[in-house]
Image: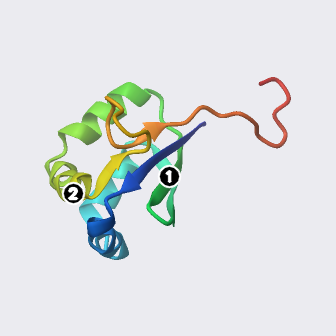
Amino acid sequence: MQRHAMVCRMRPDKREEYLALHRDVWPGVEATITQCGIQNFSIYVIGDVLFGYYEYIGDDFDADQRRMEADPVTQEWWARTAPCQVPFTEGADVPNWQQLEEAWRLGRSNM
C-alpha cells in the first residue's frame, strides 16, 4: 500500500461551490476512484487550504492514474472542481493539487 497526501487552496469566491460539490459527490466519480485502487480518500479543509489523503492498493499507480484521467465522468468532475482551486504555492507551475513528501509516520523508523 502507498500513502499519498496532497494540498491546494480554494479560491475564496468558489469555496461554497467546491464544498457543495463534495457534499454530493457523483457515484461515477467514487466508482472510478475505487476501481483505480484508491481507498480511504479524505479531503480536509481549514480556511482556504485543502488537504487530501488516500491510500493506493493497486499494482500500477501510473496506469491507474491514466485510467482515471481518461474516464469521461471524472474529466467532467475535474472540469467543475478545478476552477475552485489554485496551487498551494502561489505562482507554482504545477497542477492545483501539489503532492506532499512524507516526513514521518508512527511505526516507520526507516525514513
Residue placed under numbered mark 2 in the picture: 77
Q: Is residue 26 visible?
A: no
Q: In which image quadrant can residue 103 be found?
A: top right
Specify the amino acid type for callout 1: Gly
Q: In the rendered view, does 49 fall on the left or right side of 28? A: right
- The spot of residue 50 in percent (x, y) is 46, 56
- The spot of residue 43 in percent (x, y) is 48, 60
Checking the image for residue 52, the label placed there is 1
Disc tally is 2
- The spot of residue 49 in percent (x, y) is 47, 57
- The spot of residue 86 in percent (x, y) is 32, 48
* Scheme by which the image is coloured: rainbow
Quarter holding the C terminus?
top right
Q: In which image quadrant can residue 2 be found?
A: top right
Quarter holding the N terminus?
top right
* Image point (26%, 72%), residue name: 17
Where is 26 relative to 57, above or below?
A: below
Q: Which SS class for mark 2?
A: helix
Q: In the rendered view, does 26 fall on the left or right side of 109? A: left
* Image point (85%, 29%), residue name: 109
Q: Which is nearer the eye, 89 or 57? A: 89
Specify the amino acid type for callout 2: Trp
Among all residues in the image, which is located at the extreme front? Answer: 90
Q: In the rendered view, does 20 fall on the left or right side of 106? A: left
Where is 33 relative to 70, above or below?
A: below
* Image point (26%, 36%), residue name: 67
